[in-house]
Image (cartoon, rainbow, N blue to C red):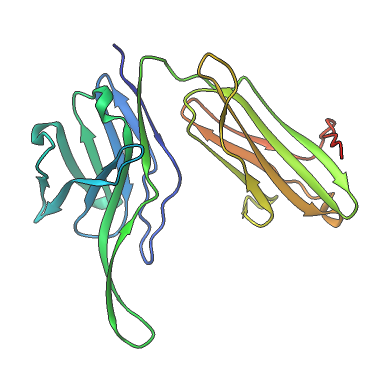
Amino acid sequence: MLLLLLLALAAAWSRRFPLSPQHTAVRTTTAQIECVFEGLSIHWYQQKEGRAPERILYVSEGKPVVETGFTANRYMVEKVSSQKRFILTIKDVIPDDAATYYCAYWDTHHDRNSKIITAKIFGSGTKLIVSSKGHSPPANSEILKKEHENQITYVCLVEKFYPEVIRVTWTDENNEEVTDSVVKGDTWKATENEEYSIGSWLTVPVKNKDKKYYCKYEHESQDRSLPTRGIYKILRVIY
């Protein structure tokens, strides 16, 4: 059975340092997950659907310590100091490895009262999908427009892709991400052939009608940016 597919869920965050699974790769049955952050040691967790996260390993004095219950020779951690990256490699990937993987580290800082606080900071997660089905790009992507009173709503539809993990964002003319008045829907299964679709809504004031916005999606198969200007398809809403 052909085993694929890894895909980053989203940019991760932390209180002080960037901590982000950002790219993954599969070579035959080996999976790699990257985490970028400024720190000396790292923890990796595995979370299966409907279950609490379990720590796979942590790095102590530069060496990985694998927890009981996980096969030590299947997990390898590499630190790329020049790029502030940690790479988790999972060897001989099997269906049971399908899960969301999180990197984490301990952060110590002072609050407003100079009290020392220590907290474990997690990335937002990287989903590992193990499947015999290869990835496929969206069959269709488009932006619909609806003007109502003093607002304009743009609906970005990305349809019939696999796997279901995808990142959809909106940016303005300066390539700055727009987060206000954005609603992202959940993916839904569009066909019986394991194809998925997603929609994202951006609402702006009518006074911004001459501004150009972009709906960007990042998928394992491809990345694409769709502009709002020049849209001819009108979203018709029945009340």
Q: Give the percent coordinates (x, y) of residue 158.
A: 63, 30
- Residue sitting at the far top: 1
Determine the residue positioned at 57% across, 29% down. 188
Determine the residue positioned at 19% across, 23% down. 92
Query: Is 112 rendered above or below residue 193?
Result: below
Quadrant position of the N terminus in the picture: top left
15 displayed left or right of 157:
left
Quadrant position of the C terminus in the picture: top right
Determine the residue positioned at 31% across, 55% down. 37
Q: Give the percent coordinates (x, y) of residue 69.
A: 12, 38
Judging depth in this view, the residue of 190 and 162 nearest the camera is 190
170 displayed left or right of 154:
left
Judging depth in this view, the residue of 175 and 29 nearest the camera is 29
- Residue sitting at the far right: 149
Query: Is 21 rendered above or below residue 156?
Result: below
In which quadrant of the rendered view does residue 68 lie? top left
Q: Give the percent coordinates (x, y) of residue 17.
A: 35, 62
Total marks placed: 0
181 displayed left or right of 222:
right
Determine the residue positioned at 32% across, 60% down. 121
77 displayed left or right of 189:
left
Q: Give the percent coordinates (x, y) of residue 8.
A: 41, 38
Query: Is 4 rendered above or below residue 208?
Result: above
